[in-house]
Image: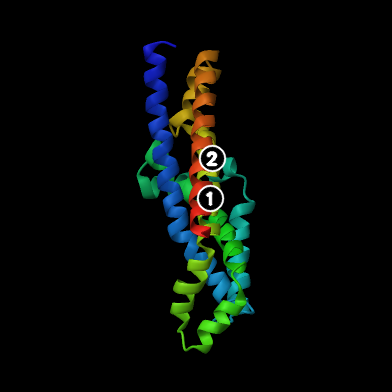
Amino acid sequence: MSPLILKLILHSTWQTLEMVVASTALSVLLGLPLALFMIATGPQGLYRLPFAARLMGMVVDAVRAVPFIILLVLLIPVTRFIAGTSLGTEAAIVPLSIAGIPYFARIAEMALREVDSGLVDAVRAMGGTRMTIIRSVLIAEALPGLVTGVTVTLITMVGASAMAGVIGAGGLGDLAIRYGYQRFNTTVMFGVVVVLIIMVSLMQVIGNSLARWLKH
């Protein structure tokens, strides 16, 4: 592998990590409140507003139903408005985050639903406030599942960021398309695949280890 190709792969890897980490962070920061809202307003929730929970669930599912490649194109005006351009690594973070927020919200919702309702009832019987229950029971008890959800979201964002290379988002996907596919350079294609495998494997190992540690 030539020094030029190695430099391109390293640069593209950094761009991919930038997109993946930023979009996952935004997905967690905004997706977790959505999950808590759907749980808290559900039929057995702390606030019991079933209509609001169903409406939010419909919005989340509607966004999740749109294939990411179509979402990329649909969000070009929004991306230009927020980032000032529809091309580049920073611009790709916008559609990646919008796709990741409802995705993580559903994963977080499932993790929160697995919390023993007896714990919630016990804290409520002891005079715990709703916010105390959310913070100290729901989130605390669901933490291993939430960490697993973050891991899954990270890996999903890796694949989505590669797909974003189709519209010039930069990163490993863009490198594979422009230098690998269009120029028939199998060395670049092989290098990109190896880096993606290593990246995903490391994320999975770290995420699984952290989730196991939190369970203990």
Q: SS of the residue at dot 2?
A: helix
Residue located farthest toward the top when viewing the structure as drawn: 2
Residue at horizontal 59%, vertical 73%? 53
Q: Quadrant of residue 9?
A: top left
Give how far apart the Cα atoms at labels 1 and 2 are: 9 Å
Front-lying residue, 56 or 108: 108
Q: Quadrant of residue 70?
A: top right
Q: SS of the residue at dot 1?
A: helix
Residue at horizontal 37%, vertical 27%? 11
Q: Estimate the x, y position of residue 205 in percent, counting from the top left.
A: 52, 41
Q: Is residue 187 above or below residue 174?
A: above
Q: Residues within 10 Å of mark 2 (few under 14, many from 20)?
A: many
**Do callouts 1 and 2 mark residues in contact (Cβ within 8 Å)?**
yes
Q: Estimate the x, y position of residue 49 in percent, counting from the top left.
A: 58, 80
Front-lying residue, 31 or 208: 208
Residue at horizontal 62%, vertical 57%? 62
Residue at horizontal 48%, vertical 67%? 140
Q: Quadrant of residue 47?
A: bottom right
Which quadrant holds the N terminus? top left
Residue marked by disc 2: 160
Residue marked by disc 1: 99
Q: Is residue 110 left or right of residue 37?
A: right
- Given the image, on which type of amino acid does mark 1 rest? Ala
Disc with the residue nearer the chain's start (1 vs 2): 1
Q: Estimate the x, y position of residue 85 in percent, counting from the top left.
A: 38, 40
Q: Is residue 145 visible?
A: yes
Q: Estimate the x, y position of residue 123 in percent, counting from the top left.
A: 51, 82
- Given the image, on which type of amino acid does mark 2 rest? Ala
Q: Is residue 120 above or below residue 73?
A: below
